[in-house]
Amino acid sequence: MLTAEQIVAAQKANIETIFGLTQKAFEGVEKLVELNVQATKAAMSESANNAQAMLSVKDAQELLTLQAALMQPLAEKTVAYSRHLYDIASGTGAEFTKAAEAQSADAQKKFMAVVDNAAKNAPAGSETAVTMMKSAVSAANNAMESVQKAVKQATEMAESNFNTVTTQATSAVKASSKKR
């Protein structure tokens, strides 16, 4: 059985984990706010510069050339913003995943210690029940590991797809602007 000290230690560890994750969440929000403030400042400055450039246009051909010149940096900045946004989200998510995996591993070890302790103190003739319980715990742990591996693979594939789409979008913008 668990002692009072073990229960208190577990609760303390859980509270520390919660506060740590809360801190990581706030750090992610701070990065997101900082990114949006920087993007807004840059957009306002560029809008003012673009408006000034538009006002100095002398004919329709110059206007078309100016518009084409303004589109490539806008598209590249949109891709860069999306990349930063993705990096913030995936970094924060990775911290949560790492903490969850650590908590899961710790909980599994503690539960197995309880099962082992119960097995040692089990009455004679209950070996089959103890073996079945250990087998069930082992199967649950294997299932959990399989799910974690699948989630990691899906995350890696999503990141790979995001990188591919980002590269293709950047290439398309560059190709489009060269044709003009």
Image (cartoon, rainbow, N blue to C red):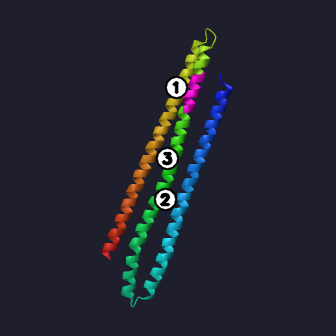
Residue found at the far right of this picture: 4
In the image shown, does 22 or 164 lie closer to the viewer?
A: 22
Residue at horizontal 45%, vertical 80%? Answer: 50
Helix, strand or loop at mark 3: helix
For disc 3, the neighbor class at 10 Å (few under 14, some 14 to 19, many from 20) is some
Q: Which residue is mark 3?
A: 94
Residue found at the far left of this picture: 179
In the image shown, does 121 or 156 lie closer to the viewer?
A: 121
- Please state which of the two labelled residues, at mark 2 or mark 1, is closer to the viewer: 2
N-terminal-most mark, 3 or 1: 3
- Image marks 3 and 1: residues in contact by CB distance under 8 Å: no
N-terminal-most mark, 3 or 2: 2
Quadrant that contains the C terminus = bottom left
- Please state which of the two labelled residues, at mark 3 or mark 1, is closer to the viewer: 3
> In the rendered structure, does residue 54 fall within the stretch colored magenta?
no
What is the x, y in percent for residue 84? 46, 59
- Residue 84 relative to residue 134: left or right: left
**Kind of residue at badge 3:** Ala
Q: Separation of disc 3 and disc 1 at Cα?
A: 26 Å
In the image shown, does 89 or 15 lie closer to the viewer?
A: 15
Q: Which residue is mark 2?
A: 85
Q: Separation of disc 3 and disc 2 at Cα?
A: 14 Å
> In the rendered structure, does residue 108 fall within the stretch colored magenta?
yes
Residue at horizontal 39%, vertical 88%? Answer: 60
Vertical arrangement, residue 63 with respect to residue 90, above or below: below
Say which quarter of the image contains residue 55. bottom left
**Kind of residue at badge 2:** Leu
Say which quarter of the image contains residue 29. bottom right
> Residues in magenta?
106-114
Q: Which residue is mark 1?
A: 138
